[in-house]
Image (tube, helix red, strand yellow):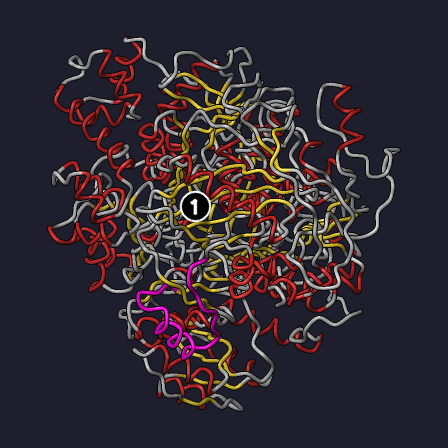
Amino acid sequence: MATALAKLKPSWNTFARRAPSLAHPSLPARSFIHTTRHVGYPTPTKPRHAIAAPAVGSYGQKDGVEEDEHVLSSPSELARKISAKVLPKIPRPDVRKVVVVGSGGLSIGQAGEFDYSGSQALKALHEEGVEAVLINPNIATWQTSHQLASEVYFLPITTDYVAYVLEKERPDGVFLTFGGQSALNVGIALDKMGIFERLGIQVLGTPIRTLEVSEDRDLFVQALKEIDIPVAQSTAVSSVNDALSAAEVIGYPVILRSAFTLGGLGSGFANDPTELANLSARSLSLSPQVLIERSMKGWKELEYEVVRDAADNTIICCNMENFDPLGTHTGDSIVVAPSQTLPDDEYHMLRSAAIKVIRHLGVVGECNIQYALNPNSREYCVIEVNARLSRSSALASKATGYPLAYTAAKIGLGHTLPELPNAVTKTTTACFEPSLDYIVTKIPKWDLAKFSGQVDRHVGSAMKSVGEVMAIGRTWEESLQKAIRMVDPKWTGFEVMRRWDGDELDDVLRNPTDMRIFAVAHAMYERDYTVEMVHKLTKIDKWFLYKIENIVNTSRMIKAAGSLEAIDKDLMDLAKRMGFSDLQISILISSTEDLVRAHRKSLGITPFVKRIDTLAAEYPAHTNYLYTTYNASEHDVTFDENGTMVLGSGVYRIGSSVEFDWCAVTCARKLRESGRKTVMVNYNPETVSTDFDEADRLYFEELSFERVMDIYEMEQAQGVVVSVGGQLPQNIALRLKNTDVKVLGTDPEMIDTAEDRHKFSAVLDKIGVDQPSWIEVTSVEAAKAFADDVGYPVLIRPSYVLSGAAMNVVYEESTLEYNLSAAASVSPDHPVVITKFIDNAQEIDVDAVAHKGQLLIHAVSEHVENAGVHSGDATLVLPPFSLPESDMVRLKTIAQEVAKAFEISGPFNMQIIRSAPSTPEGEAELKVIECNLRASRSFPFVSKVLGTNFIEIATAAIVGENVPEPVDVMTAKRDYTCVKVAQFSWTRLGGADPFLGVEMASTGEVASFGKDVHEAYWASLLSTTGFKLPRAGAGVLLGGDITKPEMRTIAKGLIDLGFKLYCSSVEIEEFLNDIPYVKAKKIFFPTKDKRKLRTVFDEYEIQCVINIARGRGQSATDEDYVARRNAVDFGLPLLNNARTAQLFVEALARKIPEGGLKRYTEGRIPSEVKSWREFVGHRA
């Protein structure tokens, strides 16, 4: 019978004779590699089990090296000569230009890890002298910089646009495995269209067939059965009825998995037919195929990262174990590397299976295999294989120091593992399995509290976290406590951070939420649950729970000591080895962090700095990849470099994401260029800044006051940069200064002045810069009095917030009291600020750099949405498309005045609102609403659009060296526009209301260029992940606030373009039908039955929802809420703001005549398909 792989393309199947695993003579005894005796690759007459052909395509000689010569990476000349004779002669692809397909905007399930892996691939191409062309609309990332790619296209990762770029660039090869699921899906579609074959483009690395088999659940299950590898009992289905039938055979509970999606999107558990019917209806709207599988909830979940080259050398780079049992998506699990609870025989059983699977599938490069393992027997099964770089690959790279993405790219270019050097040690080869003498813990970061109360806080098989942290320690207790603090600076460690009532605690332990680790803390600290009781409820392995019990017992010992003086050297040493922070200890004994720090140092207890060298210190290694621990007796490094410290941005979360990583990397590189040694401090495994070759020394460490001080004192650093890593470094800036740390750039006293509303307001008044009326209140009565005085609406917000946490616009007194209590609970130590909110005002972002109070450069970006939408969620246009020249001059003057008043040396950002003049000859009111004396999230955007790197200028200003003369880049006339659009992850957040307000909700951003605002907006909107254009003549569901003037123009524009209008209420139907030449129909609109609503949408061919309501839905049956939520759940485009909906309709009117709704056609390349260099006019 034909194999699963052969069904796709029999001619692809090839075979190789295998030899047993061999210990390599040039490696430590513990390292093993798997080799193949190289033989010819004839085309078999009948299909055989798949082993990938070594390479594909035509080849030529390179740089005077004999064709196909492969040489061992070794310092020994003899070893190199011998290896040239015996290593397999794998021909290398002859590629001079390669397209790398990126992943697009950061979203839940597909985030910063692909910036890191794509950047590594581009580095590898650069080293090989291959011209790299990148397609990625994520303007905030490091990989979309000209330092890495020859050409960058800020365009959608869709089949059509990637095909346009391939046709325009005519590359020799393409990489599909560095852009997450988006790139992989596009690659498979392009192959089916025959684009690669027609244009003569080689797919480098893992072949398309392997990608298809790993993604198509049915074929994947068949392929593994061929080699007797157990897979969960499952059935692939394409309809709800088939799903129900399959579940009857398998038996409930079942798990439903979606094919061709990322981060478990659309997956979930079903305990009965009703749950399965609802889940499968939703999942099939997001994916063409779903798999119904036997549920193994409660089993252990493990992952192996596997690297294989074209000569069939195969290694296991890293194995990882989930703290949470199966049932929680691995992206939402706490993950530990290496695995801690596997006996050696089970480890090797899964290791052997991984190698067997990856060879059979024919992966060339890197991949990830996930297992479920029965905790009570040796029964296991494969859950899935990602035949591409994944989130786990980034984590494994940082956990081991083995650069997986870089190695995978080199393998894709025809190199084999023995000839590649170990990137960390530089002395051994890449053909080794890393050994770890430390433990790594990853904890996800959820931001579910930012969303409306309708969001389900439970975590399951579909991923919900927005970021992750990685902590390194020499005991698991130390590693865990560090990781908890990294996730949120408010958390001091494994302590009681929240309490649950009676049965509620057991429910949270049994059914995990984003706070489960603290439910375990509450149970063990305050409710005296034993390890056995917690294990029974959570199914978390007892090994982890006993380690947690060690932390609990240590905490009780500290508390029992009662005072700082009573903590002797032994107890302090034990506490630090267990991962307790100075602050954590101070809280337990009612002292202060500074006193505990002084006492600890007086006892001679300070951390040791250790290296990550990939070889567990078996071989000498001079790496700069460092961490601190108290479980050691000596340092691995000497402290003689006196570098400049750059504090990174920490964990990605809503409000602080990859844009600050771009800022940190740019700053560190500029400092190195100027001859300074650099010390990077960050703990985010998804970032480029935590790549060990980006700074002279990398500390994978906390960004707390305690740890920054430890590193500063040990390194005897020249100074600390706090203004390129977002809000986290800013929060400790003043304290650092007060502890005699040399904080470079703007004085932390001024940073504090800008953060404190009273001080900030007084400065603005002093320099004559306008601001909205505001007051700080401590009672509801005072708030009501102010609102009555200035008139509604008003904006309420607490001081010191990140991304508008707990901000609300209040339109009437009746809601003021409730909103005030909700806002005040966020930060009870700070009273609440109330500001007059100016309705229908325009919002403007000013990004700038100054030196000693003199403005050096500035950029003015215009928001499409009116004020009231958080700037992180807003659509930004640069250059501005509607601001008069007079306002541009006034905005520059305000920037100059603010820079001077705060004596700024470095980057800063202001948000300004503009109220239109009341008379034609009058002047618009410009009021400053916020000012951050640091880099903002729009710094990468303005730098790339204007072709001038603002952070390089800011770095010069921060250190006061080679400061350039002031320049006004806004006066130049440009023949292009760039639009930045927010990337939302509503699909992931079941129940969340997809409504834009003053609370930031987006997880990422994309941007595209065009000849005007309409073309740029068109391309950028299509660049948001999952955006599907409505078909010509399809139905549009229109709803919301009929008092908005845009409602008329939107309706008229859609009718003129041939779309059909539908609505859910009589009021809107009457309003729309009163507009001349507009016809709208009210449809049956069930608000409680999702499946019925889906049927209605299908019946009327509704392919787009425009809902421009004034406020959030007040209930789950609110018609506007149901329309918005189901647009997201059904995978339809949603426009939820009047101004952007208007712009979308205008863009449709421009693009439809140009064929904007048509699919890719050979020979027709749209005008927006130009590279960044072509738009800007130079390699910026």
Residue lying at 61% horizontally and 29% vertically, measured from the top left: 23
In reply to whether residue 91 is colored magenta, the answer given is no
Q: Position of residue 48 (x, y in %)?
A: 67, 59
Task: Kindly indicate the quadrant of the structure image that contains residue 965.
Answer: top right
- Side of 1028 relative to 254 (left or right): right
Residue lying at 36% horizontally and 18% vertically, measured from the top left: 739
Disc 1 target residue:
467
Q: Position of residue 1075 (x, y in %)?
A: 48, 88
- Side of 859 relative to 74 (left or right): left
Q: Is residue 894 visible?
A: no
Which residue is at the front of the view, 115 or 1032? 115
Q: Is residue 167 visible?
A: yes
- Side of 236 relative to 1165 (left or right): left
Which quadrant: the N terminus? bottom right
Residue lying at 32% horizontally and 66% vertically, measured from the top left: 270
The range drawn in magenta is 231-255
